[in-house]
Image (cartoon, rainbow, N blue to C red):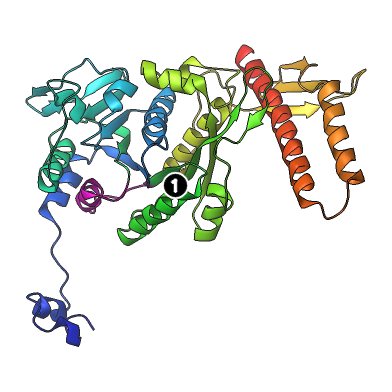
């Protein structure tokens, strides 16, 4: 029992534990709860390792939620490597202090940003701080910033489980955190650290909204062929999620247009409405997170009703026409989504698998990889055409 075990002997808190009385609530956490009373939903974006695109996901999640007309704030607590000012297109702005506290920088009418990057005299200055000073600044960001009424507060944390993570978990302890979105890439070396991040969340009682696999393949803009730049060894993020019983939020492919949006500091979903392989995965991610937080699926600009389109195969002279039907009842026929040449290639590969020698696992795996790539190519073309047709209508 607490306070009565032999290991407790000599501990200064032995009597307190033995009495059964819990520790008093942290005054700082109570202050944060009071200050953020008008924030409806708080979401952490975490990663076990740097370089997996965590800040890209955090920034575009904030932009995407703002696209649904929600009031959004994004807080950058990556003290030593702040990137939100650049990714939100406000790197030349400064933070001003008013009677109600620091005023966050507005990236849009309904999107507020706060980062230590706004406070550096020179963008190249290094932030060399110990833990207590980092904790103090994070507390100020939560209690001294005039966030106002927000539907969502997105918190972009540094990679790993360091001082910033311990501080934010402690300061938000008295609040109802919606959960954490954990970002990874398919490599096993990244997944090893994600497992630690999941363990951290469970120990600190932070709900896990799910894991998103970033940089999951590259679709060639010329031939639409999908290549796994970081081939998964042990099932990737999806396999790990199944093993650790956490939600899998899908995957986002490498996309030059997504990179361009982050470099320009603009909304990827707001500026790329069709023809980009990362559009649908990101929109799905934003919709899933919003629905997990609020219980209601959001509506994006240009959506008809639920904002989705259906693709169904219709009979035609060549048998390969695809009917793209939007929710408002309008439709258009896509003849080129699935070409005879692509189908012939796919049939040829399948025939080769059937005729090939049994037991040749290397050739079988190679054939399966070709089939998967071709199917992915066809799916991507149909999805892009559906999105374009829905936006046009």
Please state the horizontal and vertical placement of residue 342, each as a whole percent of the image.
81, 25
Name which residue lies at 13% across and 80% down: 19
Q: Is residue 389 left or right of residue 142?
A: right
Please state the horizontal and vertical placement of residue 67, each as a whole percent of the image.
43, 23
Q: Give the quarter of the figure containing the N terminus.
A: bottom left
Q: Is residue 24 visible?
A: yes
Tell me which segment is drawn in magenta.
Answer: 160-179
SS for dot 1: helix
Look at the picture and state if 28 lies above or below 379: below
Q: Give the quarter of the figure containing the C terminus.
A: top right
Disc 1 residue crowd, few under 14, some 14–19, many 20+, Cα 10 Å:
many
Please state the horizontal and vertical placement of residue 315, each as a whole percent of the image.
89, 23
Name which residue lies at 32% across and 42% down: 42
Q: Which residue is mark 1?
A: 190
Q: Is residue 297 visible?
A: no
Name which residue lies at 31% across and 37% down: 156
Q: Is residue 379 left or right of residue 265?
A: right
Look at the picture and state if 96 lies above or below 202: above
Q: 370 or 109, which lies in front?
A: 370
Q: Quadrant of residue 312?
A: top right
Q: 259 or 84, which lies in front?
A: 259
Please state the horizontal and vertical placement of residue 223, each as a whole percent of the image.
69, 20
Q: Is residue 123 magenta?
A: no
Look at the picture and state if 345 lies above or below 391: below
Q: Residue furthest top?
A: 392
Q: How many marks?
A: 1
Q: Quadrant of residue 32?
A: top left
Q: 23 or 320, which lies in front?
A: 320
Q: Quadrant of residue 310?
A: top right
Name which residue lies at 41% across and 45% down: 182
């Amino acid at each position: 029992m607490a306070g009565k075990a032999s290991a407790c002997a000599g501990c200064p808190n032995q009597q307190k534990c033995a009495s059964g009385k819990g520790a008093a609530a942290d005054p700082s956490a109570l202050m944060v709860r009071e200050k953020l009373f008008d924030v409806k939903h708080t979401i952490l974006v975490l990663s076990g390792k740097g370089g997996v695109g965590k800040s890209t996901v955090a920034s575009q999640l904030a932009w995407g939620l703002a696209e649904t007309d929600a009031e959004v704030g994004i807080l950058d607590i990556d003290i030593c490597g702040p990137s939100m000012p650049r990714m939100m297109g406000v790197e030349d702005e400064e933070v001003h202090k008013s009677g109600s506290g620091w005023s966050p920088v507005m990236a849009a009418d309904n999107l507020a940003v706060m980062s230590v990057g706004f406070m550096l005299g020179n963008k190249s200055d290094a932030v060399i701080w110990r833990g207590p000073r980092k904790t103090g600044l994070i507390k100020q960001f939560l209690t001294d910033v005039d966030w106002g009424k927000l539907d969502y507060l997105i918190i972009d944390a540094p990679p790993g489980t360091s001082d910033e993570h311990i501080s934010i978990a402690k300061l938000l302890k008295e609040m109802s955190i919606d959960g954490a979105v954990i970002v990874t890439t398919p490599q096993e070396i990244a997944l090893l650290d994600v497992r630690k991040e999941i363990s951290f969340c469970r120990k600190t009682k932070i709900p896990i909204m799910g894991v998103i696999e970033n940089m999951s393949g590259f679709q060639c803009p010329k031939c639409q062929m999908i290549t796994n730049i970081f081939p998964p060894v042990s099932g990737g993020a999806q396999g790990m999620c199944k093993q650790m019983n956490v939600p899998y939020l899908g995957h986002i492919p490498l996309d030059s247009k997504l990179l361009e949006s982050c470099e320009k500091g603009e909304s990827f979903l707001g500026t790329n409405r069709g023809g980009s392989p990362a559009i649908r995965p990101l929109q799905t991610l934003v919709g899933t997170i919003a629905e997990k937080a609020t219980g209601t699926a959001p509506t994006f600009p240009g959506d008809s009703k639920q904002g989705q389109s259906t693709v169904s195969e219709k009979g035609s002279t060549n048998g390969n026409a695809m009917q793209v039907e939007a929710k408002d009842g309008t439709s258009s026929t896509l003849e080129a989504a699935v070409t005879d040449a692509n189908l012939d290639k796919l049939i040829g590969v399948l025939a080769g698998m059937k005729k090939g020698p049994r037991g040749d696992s290397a050739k079988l795996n190679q054939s399966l990889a070709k089939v998967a790539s071709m199917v992915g190519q066809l799916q991507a073309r149909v999805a892009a055409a559906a999105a374009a047709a829905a936006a046009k209508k």
